[in-house]
Image (cartoon, rainbow, N blue to C red):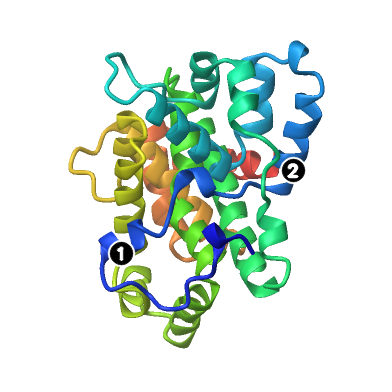
Amino acid sequence: MPAAHALITRAPRDLAGWVALFDAGDLPVLAGTAAALEDLRGVEDAVDAHLLADALSSDPLMTLKLMAHLARLRRGRDGSDTETVTEALVMLGIPPFFRAFGPQTTVEDLLALQPAALDGFQQVLRRSHRAARFAVAFAAHRMDHDAAVIHEAALLHDFAELLLWLRAPALALEVKRRQQADPGLRSATAQRMCLHIDLDELQHALMAAWRLPATLVRITDGQAHAETPQWRNVRLAIRVARHSAMGWDNPALPDDVAEIGRLLQLAPEPTLRLLREIDAD
């Protein structure tokens, strides 16, 4: 395993210690993303930002790498943030992208000898993909012009948990074990017991350290004080993705359906029908 991806076996004492362990430039990507990039590299002259974005935009770790890379290049420059993968690729340019991002290390290779960690990572990834589908569907129903940013925010919302499974699988398994032993134990409490922090704190700190777009940070912030429609859109998409992960009989779902109905101005039955349709796509 490369030094940048050495496993963390003991939790740092504080948030700053955790943040120091991660560099966006060293993140691995999904195997499918790595393969797609190499295919497109071979036909670089025929590639545009939209085609390349299609290959990247379902991979939260590649999205983070791209956004952080562009933020480093633009440090100190005036101008609005690039908020989506497509915008970032247009700003960066296709040849510079391929020069900056050579063949990528993959999650699957790094966790090949850690099957429990790979399974945990993939569970979080599936949840993130479902949340992103719900979020962009809600945004489309609301006719929100920032649907792409909302999709991205939902996809990235749990990236700190992905990093935990990737770099500290033993600690991630201990958090999971404690919650299984005590179903009433809140995630944040279990995380503090095992990690000395909660993952929302780590995620927000990493987004700030990597200078991710301000709009994306605000929408993703679990402790946001201003509950905008975009923020509610993302939070409700994440909630329903979590609560329906094992089926549609979770007792928390009726409350989710009621709140989503208020967001979308739909009655409960049409809301539930819409959710099932989104999930079936």
The N terminus: image quadrant: bottom right
Identify the image quadrant of the C terminus: top right
Mark nearer the N terminus (1 vs 2): 1
Q: Is residue 270 visible?
A: no
**Could one spot residue 186 in this view of the protein?**
yes
Above or below residue 75? Residue 102 is below
Answer with left or right where residue 37 lies relative to residue 67: right
| Category of crowding for the residue at label 1, using alpha-carbon neighbours closer than 10 angstroms: few (below 14), some (14–19), many (at least 20) | few
Mark 1, secondary structure of its residue: helix
Hey, what amino acid is under mark 1? Gly
- Tell me which residue sits at (39%, 29%) in the image: 71
Say if 125 sits above or below 12 in the image: above
Image x and y of residue 169, in percent = 54, 72
Q: Residue furthest bottom?
A: 181
Q: Depth check: 54 or 223 in front?
A: 54
Image position of 18 with respect to 205: above or below:
below
Of residues 112 and 117, the one nearer the viewer is: 112
Secondary element at tag 2: helix
Q: Residues within 10 Å of mark 2 (few under 14, many from 20)?
A: few
Q: Is residue 181 left or right of residue 187?
A: right
Position of residue 194 measured from the top left corner of the image (x, y, whole percent): 37, 79
The kind of residue tagged 2 is Gly
- Mark sitting on residue 120: none
Q: CA distance from mark 1 to mark 2?
A: 32 Å
Which residue has dot 2 on it? Answer: 32
In terms of depth relative to the viewer, which is nearer, 248 or 100? 100
Residue under circle 1? Answer: 17
Q: What residue is shown at x 35% (from left), y 43% (from top)?
A: 207
Nearer-the-camera pick, 74 or 141: 74
The residue shown at (29%, 37%) is: 218
